């Protein structure tokens, strides 16, 4: 596993909780920057108190999302303000940034400005058709932009076979091929998801990916208190959003009892793995 990943998180098998910001300015449903920032900080504090290992701030409520090329500067400004507030209130806990749709350079700029620690990127290699439009390979542009910013200390964790998308164009490639390509094109880790938000990837997909890359592997969707133990030895990190929310709905507020339950399952599974059971 990449030493950068191991240094970033205090414990092995880190759980990274999603903070879904409120709609950005200009997006239907936006209730203001201050309101969104306050809610994000409240969620961050709760997650930190209950034992998660990192946070990932994402503009999930910018729905329907637009591609980076159609995105105005208000999104970067909004996300930077929210990220700065979150980072200020969680101390040394790692905080990452993802900006939909495929706004990977924007995410890097926000992370760099806000002092955040990593970025999650989509559309890293190859191309696919998502429910938001076509995503083309972005690794070359993003890594050159990271170099230009002087932000080479910010790792990029790239999705392979991105959820909410058709992968017909790459149907002749296995998920192992795509993971290997992500590593070749400079990703610092790979994220494996199910077909849509709230659905876990197949264990066989994770086994295939592990056979093809030495990068850290993160599960990016579908984990909950009931199935976490089935995945703990198949990946290096776990990004969790829906399962922490009321009724398991990503649009709902964070539910303290669900966070406690899932973190309890995480601690148990970690203990079982350490003991070789």
Image: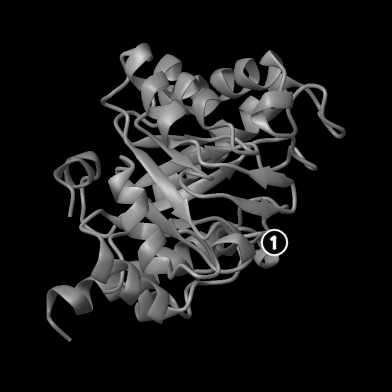
Asked if one can make out residue 238 in the rendered structure from this viewpoint, the answer is no
Return the residue nearer the eye: 170 or 7: 170
Q: Residue at position x 48%, y 59% from top?
A: 220
Q: Quadrant of residue 12?
A: bottom left
Q: Which residue is mark 1?
A: 249
Image spot of residue 137 (x, y percent): 51, 41
Left or right placement of residue 270 versus residue 45 in this view: left
Q: Residue at position x 21%, y 79% from top?
A: 272
In the picture shown, does residue 15 fall above or below 135? below
Asked if one can make out residue 24 in the rendered structure from this viewpoint, the answer is yes
Residue count near mark 1 (Cα–Cα under 10 Å), binned few <14, some 14–19, many ≥20: some
Image spot of residue 78 (x, y percent): 64, 20
Image spot of residue 20 (x, y percent): 62, 42
Image spot of residue 145 (x, y percent): 42, 20
Q: Residue at position x 63%, y 38% from top?
A: 100
Q: Quadrant of residue 176?
A: bottom left
The quadrant in which the N terminus is found is: bottom left
| Helix, strand or loop status at disc 1 | loop
Left or right placement of residue 35 versus residue 268 in this view: right
The quadrant in which the C terminus is found is: bottom left
């Amino acid at each position: 596993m990449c030493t950068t990943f191991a240094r970033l998180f205090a414990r092995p098998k880190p759980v990274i909780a999603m903070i879904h910001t409120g709609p950005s300015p200009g997006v239907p449903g936006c209730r203001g920057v201050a309101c969104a920032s306050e809610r994000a900080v409240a969620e961050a504090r709760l997650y930190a108190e209950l034992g998660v290992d990192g946070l990932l701030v994402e503009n999930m409520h910018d729905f329907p999302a637009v591609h980076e090329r159609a995105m105005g500067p208000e999104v970067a400004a909004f996300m930077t303000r929210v990220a700065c507030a979150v980072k200020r209130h969680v101390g040394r806990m790692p905080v990452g940034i993802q900006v939909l749709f495929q706004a990977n350079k924007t995410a890097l700029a926000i992370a760099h400005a806000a002092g955040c620690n990593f970025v999650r990127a989509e559309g890293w290699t190859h191309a696919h058709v998502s429910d938001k439009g076509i995503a083309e390979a972005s690794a070359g542009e993003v890594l050159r932009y990271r170099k230009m910013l002087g932000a080479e200390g910010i790792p990029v964790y790239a999705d392979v076979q991105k959820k909410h998308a058709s992968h017909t164009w790459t149907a002749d490639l296995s998920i192992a091929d795509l993971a290997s390509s992500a590593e070749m094109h400079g990703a610092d880790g790979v994220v494996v998801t199910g077909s849509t938000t709230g659905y876990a990837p197949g264990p066989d997909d994770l086994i295939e990916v592990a056979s093809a890359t030495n990068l850290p592997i993160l599960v990016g969707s579908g984990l909950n208190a009931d199935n976490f133990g089935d995945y703990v030895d198949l990946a290096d990190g776990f990004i969790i959003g829906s399962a922490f929310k009321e009724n398991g709905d990503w649009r709902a507020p964070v539910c303290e009892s669900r966070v406690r339950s899932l973190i309890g399952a995480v601690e148990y599974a970690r203990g079982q793995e350490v003991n070789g059971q």
